[in-house]
Amino acid sequence: MFQSPPALATGDPEKGRALFSRCASCHQVGPSARNGFGPQLNGIIGRRAGSVEGYVYSPAMKNATLVWSEKNLKTFLKSPGDTVPGNKMRFWGMGSDSQIADLLAYLRQYP
């Protein structure tokens, strides 16, 4: 008998909203989001790294050749310092693939 392949993890935006509280001291997202200690994250998926108008990036991030695809964001969220060495983000990484999927599901709500 044939079995269906397992569904791809798309994440839970509600869980992602709760996880975003870890990011909220530096980043904002949503209709009134502004740059703060970190850049605002509206429309991050598909955006070139280091490109938010009005935010002063580290030279490492400004010169990064990344476009924030979900794959690149997953890699960055796991290990920011390995993905963009010399960036100034003070976040050591998120080890859980399911938490990263949840966080990305939340961010996808703000194109």
Image: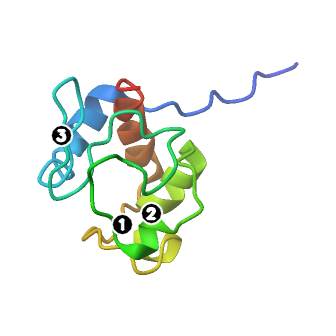
Label 2, secondary structure: give it: helix
Q: Is residue 93 visible?
A: yes
Label 1, secondary structure: give it: loop
x and y, in percent, of residue 65 in the image: 59, 62
Q: Please, what is the three-letter code of the amino acid marked with disc 3?
A: Arg
| Nearest to viewer (mark 3 / mark 1) | 3
Marks 2 & 3, CB-CB < 8 Å contact: no
N-term-proximal mark, 3 vs 1 = 3
Q: Dot 1 corresponds to which residue?
A: 93
Q: CA distance from mark 2 to mark 3?
A: 25 Å
Q: CA distance from mark 2 to mark 1?
A: 5 Å
- Furthest-bottom residue in this view: 86
| Nearest to viewer (mark 2 / mark 3) | 3
Q: Residues within 10 Å of mark 1 (few under 14, many from 20)?
A: some
Indicate the quadrant containing the N terminus: top left, top right, bottom left or bottom right.
top right
Q: Dot 3 corresponds to which residue?
A: 34
